[in-house]
Image (cartoon, grey):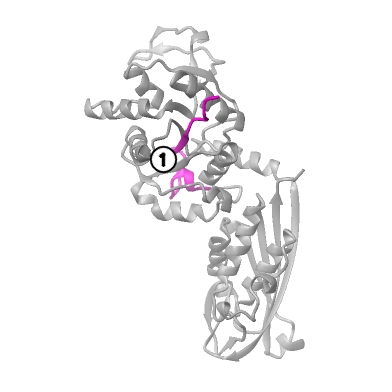
Amino acid sequence: MSPSPKVSLIVVAAGRGTRLGGDEPKQYRLCAGRPLICHTLEALAAAYEFAATTVVIHPNDQAFYDRALTFLSTRCAATIGPPAMGGATRQESCLAGLAAQAPLQSDLVLIHDGARPFPPADLIHRAVAAAAEHGAAAPGLPLSDTIKEIDHAGVVVATPLRANLRAMQTPQAFRFDLIYDAHRRAERDGRGDFTDDAAIAEWAGWPTHIFPGDPANVKITEMSDLLAAEARLTAEATDIRIGQGFDVHAFAEGDGVWLGGVKIPHDRALSGHSDADVVLHAIVDALLGAIGDGDIGAHFPPSDEKWRGAPSRLFVEDAARRVRERGGAIANIDATIICEKPKIGPHRDTMRAAIAEMSGVAVDRVAIKATTSEGLGFTGRGEGIACLAIATVRLRPTA
């Protein structure tokens, strides 16, 4: 029996995604609680054990990419190597990814779009088998609509036979040396007009085998695609959990209090082993409660000097990571701060933005409310601040 081929993976994610709009490339837009590219990478890592995975990113997107990595499960993140820097076109970006992987001497390589978040596992395995058999292969779907070729005036000049046409998908799969050589030849010949890797293989003289694609393997292009993907991912996460957290910290000497990741000027501080951010501590317990994973004291005990004076955002980031490790997403966070002073209203939106950033959700999924205790109890006497938090988490059911 011949040994299994060494298969590597290139995920192309250097595009700008202008048709989707927004201030960030589509592959980094949040979708069901994670950047879109994270869903793609998780699906690929779960489908096949690749010898190496290289993500090709735009040179200006390093910060977006680094943040996206924090949303990956530990298992998936461990499979991804350093990113390659893409070029002005998809063709240039693919060549950059191939060049980065050339020293690995893989037998086969799969090249996939970063904005295709639903590659089925059986499609990945069929791509590997097709590349091993044919050298160059790509998934394609039959067309349901008749296609017309038109001229510059919009007049039909041809009607191709629909039965012979296919809509191409990724991952496209190749013998590594074959596609790397074809890309380098195209670069040397000044051919930069290819829209997919199969076209480059064809141009280089390699017959490309088309195997059946999968209608579920959609590419996110328009806003409607992103909304449909979010609906699909949300529909799959039917195990809805709600967690509650409550925390209290007393006042001490100081010149400001940390609340919701924001330092608010005040004539006192809050006493605690870390930065004593009562809001973030309550949120952490709510998130951990939703997934049944202990409480903040179990994971960050005050007896551990490592956490003395630590920023509480670290605790929120860890709790959010634990949710993602379960394959879940944070649906919303709702916190109520109980104090007489300081006034929360002027800082509410800044706190919401900070909490959204550290927990990895859109800001409209974070609510901050404040109330007094009408002069009653320790908060009414100005002895400290309390916070009640509730978090809703969506998980995919486990067998």
380 w.r.t. 142: above or below: below
Asked whether 54 or 58 is in front, the reply is 54
Mark 1 surroundings: few (<14), some (14-19) or many (≥20) residues within 10 A? few
Which residue is under mark 1? Answer: 18
At x 57% / y 33%, what residue is drawn?
119
Tell me which corner region of the image, top left, top right, bottom left or bottom right, holds residue 207: top left
Q: Position of residue 124 (x, y in %)?
A: 55, 30
At x 72% / y 58%, what residue is drawn?
291
Q: Position of residue 393 (x, y in %)?
A: 70, 55
Asked whether 74 or 146 is in front, the reply is 74
Q: Is residue 331 visible?
A: yes
Write the start and end of the magenta stretch as one range: 1-30
Determine whether the residue tagged by mark 1 lies in a helix, strand or loop.
loop
For the N terminus, give its image quadrant: top right
* Residue projecting furthest to the bottom: 253
Tell me which amino acid carries mark 1: Thr
| Residue 67 counted in the magenta span | no
Residue 146 appears left or right of 302: left
* Residue projecting furthest to the left: 189
Q: Position of residue 319 (x, y in %)?
A: 63, 63
| Residue 9 counted in the magenta span | yes
Asked whether 391 or 131 is in front, the reply is 131
Question: Mainly helix, strand or loop, the magenta region?
Answer: loop
